[in-house]
Amino acid sequence: MTKLLKKMHSGHSFVFLLAAATLWTMAGCRSGHPSDAVKQYIYKIENRYPHDGQAYTQGLFIHRGQLYESVGQYGQSSLRKIDLPTGDVVATYTLPASVFAEGACVWHDTIYQLSWQERTCFLYDTTLRPVGELHYDGEGWGLTSDGVHLIMSDGSSILKFLNPADFSEQRYLNVTCEGKAIPLLNELEYIDGEIWANVYTYDYIIRINPGNGKVTGVVFMQKLLPQELRTARTDVLNGIAYDVATKRIFVTGKNWPILYEVSAVETRN
């Protein structure tokens, strides 16, 4: 999502309390009490690829081997097709300056791209040609698909399962870890029957059971981007893409110069 200061304009205390609650809850998940149910993982870097360090990554996905990226910020928002090996932008659609782009995914060869507060989802074909719009209430953060529904986050602990035809809500999940709600859910990816989610401002990815909303695992991503590659513009971990054909997982962050191919290695509590 947006930088934390941008999100705080309507309620400083609320945002800080959410962040504090998230940190406390995840510490509880790591405590190792009754919880073999919440597995812990560290990352293994399988490969590195160039990434545009000026791209404020909001959404990332792979469709038929092609990498797509939704880039945010007012006046800078776009949808891009990226050449994975080189990081070059091979096609782009630029949104109006009044739109702050958010998460994106594909469903049946139609690309869906959320906006933050504009309550509009933009639809494209795979050439990035606009083909329509849908509308929703509240904020848009992350978006993925389980092949039947679109799954949307809005910065809370709730994930909404939507009808791709009209964005009507079919059901929702309250995401919890050890019984505690996990707010600030951001970018999403559906991977082998689980929902993987960035938690805004935190260096880990949670793995969620789409049936009951329980966190089944935490992938700790601390120090993935080394300090020597960080600048004043470097922002938080955000962006998860899964290549179904090759079973490869890719992650990056906002204004990061590297896109990482990673695997998750389970550790003991």
Image: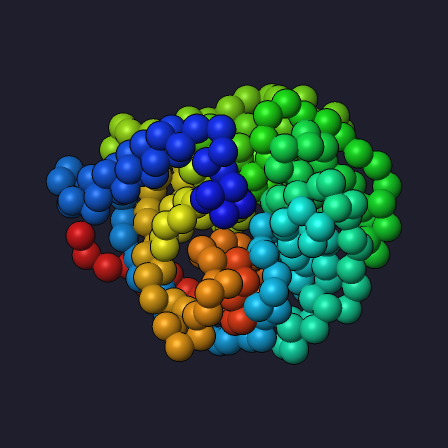
Q: With respect to residue 121, does 78 lie above or below?
A: below
Residue at 70% from the left image edge and 73% from the top image edge: 88
Q: Nearer the viewer, residue 88 or 116?
A: 116
Q: Residue 204: where, in percent of width, then height? A: 36, 53
Q: Is residue 230 left or right of residue 84?
A: left
Judge from the rendering whether residue 205 lies leftward or rightward of residue 147; answer left or right: left
State whether residue 46 is above or below residue 100: below
The residue drawn where x is 62% and y is 44% is 102
**Residue 101: horizontal and vertical position, in percent?**
66, 45
Residue at 44% of width from left, 70% of height from top?
Answer: 230
Q: How many marks?
A: 0
Q: Choose top left, top right, bottom left or bottom right for residue 178.
A: top left
Q: Position of residue 225 (x, y in %)?
A: 41, 69
In the shown orientation, is residue 195 left or right of residue 22? right
Residue 104, visible in the rendered structure: no
Is residue 32 visible in the rendered structure shown here? Answer: yes
- Residue closer to the observer: 106 or 116: 116
Residue at x-position 50% and y-position 76%: 48
Q: How is the image coloured?
A: rainbow
